[in-house]
């Protein structure tokens, strides 16, 4: 059975598994600026932000233009302050030259890194611009070990309208955005997927990830996309978007620096989803994917991307499913997401000696429980696996990209049902996230591939020498965070 057939079966299994939990169907804003515009509490659009409810998904699909609020004389501006504290199970105490060597002077601490509220801040335009045109636009200021300054963050601009054809109601939209998947309304896409908050500390996580999960470093503003979508009969969603790279000079000016690998030409992105809502229940089953030509920076004397020089071609095929049960007191969300990436490494094989073709698979299965929109508990299992490649994954003795573990999150959201009297549209999320690794870059111990005797034997487990041996569990990470929005 080839890899694509495996992906189809995996996607079908995810969908059928969640469908079986709810049986047969029958008929049935985190931003303060959104709350002011609609007159709704944050809990109307979110179970625990940024996880969307069915109403929140339709508000976004409708172009952020729904009204009903009383505070409409002011522009839809909002602000966010962020703070975080990160602690590794074992600090960065590796030997010089290793991936876990202590940070040089002026960088991050080897452990226990703290960024207070003055270090991270965002300003948003979130809501209606005019008529059927609306936007979510974010600019972020960060001050950390890498320096300080503003950058262009997530942006999603939409024009929407409706029509009826053959008895079917159709909501359609034109969309422009600057981050692959930021336009999606289901919280399985990596752009809005769990974990919702990740550390800015300079710890190097697993070496392998798919393009859709950020392997190419294409953050907001390093690519731009434009496309269209249709939501048919409040059930079937179809989207096609094309992405291209912004110029290097633009990336320097707006995002703080260019991506290490650049997108060549236009990368088509598609999304198909079927959502059914009945009573307190909602079920979505979908697929999405992208095909991209990537200009890689390797070790060749010939500049990549010039005439006659090939590009790598990355093809991601993904399947996802989501079930929600929402009441006034209890809210449960179950999520599953599977990505298969085929890597045709036409450029990398010439530059650095990789395999001709590699595969990478990413699986996430998680559950979230929220009590009275105030207390949220989330657990997610993740598994990254793929083809061993001595050039891509030389940091471990097995040349493997495989990593797996669990992510747990506990959060307190004091203002989901209304903020303090002085500013009733305020919002906040205070939480703890713990990432537990059972395997890291192919191994559970000696993940740095450093502790070997002259014959190449591993010395981490009972060897006579006392080498530096780092285990997967040493990278377990505790993150305490705070979001304040007003």
Image (cartoon, helix red, strand yellow):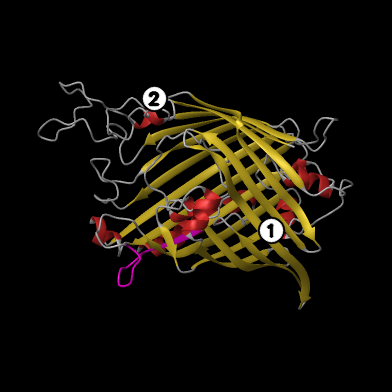
Res 284 visible = yes
Can you give x and y, in whole percent of width and height, for residue 426 in the image? 77, 35
Q: Is residue 269 left or right of residue 347?
A: right
User: For residue 475, what is the image quadrant?
Assistant: top left
Residue segment shown in magenta: 304-318
| Residue corresponding to mark 1 | 276
Image x and y of residue 24, in percent: 66, 56
What is the CA distance from the residue labelled 1 to the residue labelled 2?
47 Å
Q: In which quarter of the image is residue 167?
A: bottom right
Residue sitting at x 57%, y 33%: 409
Is 121 on the left-hand or right-hand side of 364? right
Foreground tag (1 vs 2)? 2
Q: Looking at the image, which residue is at 40% across and 64% down? A: 4
Q: Residue at x 60, y 66 (%)?
A: 226
Q: Nearer the viewer, residue 397 or 423?
A: 423
Would you place residue 451 above or below residue 175 in this image? Answer: above
Residue receiving disc 2: 91
Up-down relation of residue 363 to residue 109 (above or below): below
């Amino acid at each position: 059975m080839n890899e694509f057939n495996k992906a189809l079966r995996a996607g079908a299994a995810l969908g059928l598994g969640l469908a079986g939990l709810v049986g047969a169907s029958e008929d049935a804003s985190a931003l303060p600026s959104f709350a002011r515009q609609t007159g709704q509490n944050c809990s109307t659009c979110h179970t625990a932000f940024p996880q969307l409810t069915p109403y929140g998904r339709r508000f976004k699909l409708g172009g952020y233009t729904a009204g009903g609020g009383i505070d409409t004389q002011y522009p839809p501006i909002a602000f966010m302050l962020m703070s975080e504290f990160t602690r590794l199970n074992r600090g960065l105490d590796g030997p010089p030259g290793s991936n876990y060597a202590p940070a040089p002077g002026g960088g991050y601490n080897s452990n226990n890194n703290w960024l207070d509220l003055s270090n991270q801040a965002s300003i948003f335009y979130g809501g209606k611009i005019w008529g059927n045109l609306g936007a979510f636009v974010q600019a972020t200021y960060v001050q950390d070990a890498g320096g300080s300054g503003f950058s262009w963050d997530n942006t999603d601009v939409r024009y929407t309208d409706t029509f009826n054809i053959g008895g079917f109601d159709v909501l359609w939209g034109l969309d422009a955005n600057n981050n692959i998947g930021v336009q999606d309304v289901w919280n399985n896409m990596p752009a809005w997927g769990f974990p919702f908050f990740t550390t800015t500390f300079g710890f190097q996580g697993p070496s392998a990830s798919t393009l859709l999960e950020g392997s190419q470093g294409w953050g907001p503003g390093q690519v731009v996309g434009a496309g269209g979508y249709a939501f048919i009969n409040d059930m079937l969603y179809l989207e096609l978007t094309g992405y291209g790279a912004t110029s290097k000079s633009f990336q320097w000016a707006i995002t703080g620096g260019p991506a290490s690998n650049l997108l060549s030409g236009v990368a088509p992105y598609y999304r198909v989803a079927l959502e059914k809502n009945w009573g307190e229940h909602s079920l979505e089953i979908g697929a999405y994917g992208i095909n991209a030509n990537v200009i890689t920076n390797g070790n060749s004397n010939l500049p990549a991307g010039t005439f006659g020089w090939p590009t790598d071609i990355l093809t991601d095929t993904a399947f996802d499913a989501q079930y929600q049960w929402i009441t006034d007191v209890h809210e449960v969300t179950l999520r599953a997401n599977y990505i298969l990436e085929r890597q045709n490494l036409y450029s990398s094989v010439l530059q650095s000696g990789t395999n001709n073709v590699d595969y990478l698979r990413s699986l996430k299965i998680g559950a979230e429980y929220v009590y009275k929109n105030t207390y949220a508990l989330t657990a997610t299992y993740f598994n990254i696996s793929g083809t061993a490649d001595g050039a891509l994954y030389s940091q471990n003795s097995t040349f493997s990209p495989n990593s797996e573990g669990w992510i747990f999150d506990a959060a307190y959201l004091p203002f989901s049902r209304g903020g303090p009297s002085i500013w009733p549209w305020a919002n906040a999320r205070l939480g703890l996230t713990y990432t537990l690794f059972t395997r890291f870059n192919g191994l559970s111990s000696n993940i740095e591939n450093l502790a070997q005797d002259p014959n190449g034997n591993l010395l981490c487990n009972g060897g006579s020498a006392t080498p530096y041996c780092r285990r997967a569990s040493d990278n377990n990470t505790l993150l305490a965070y705070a979001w304040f929005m007003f």
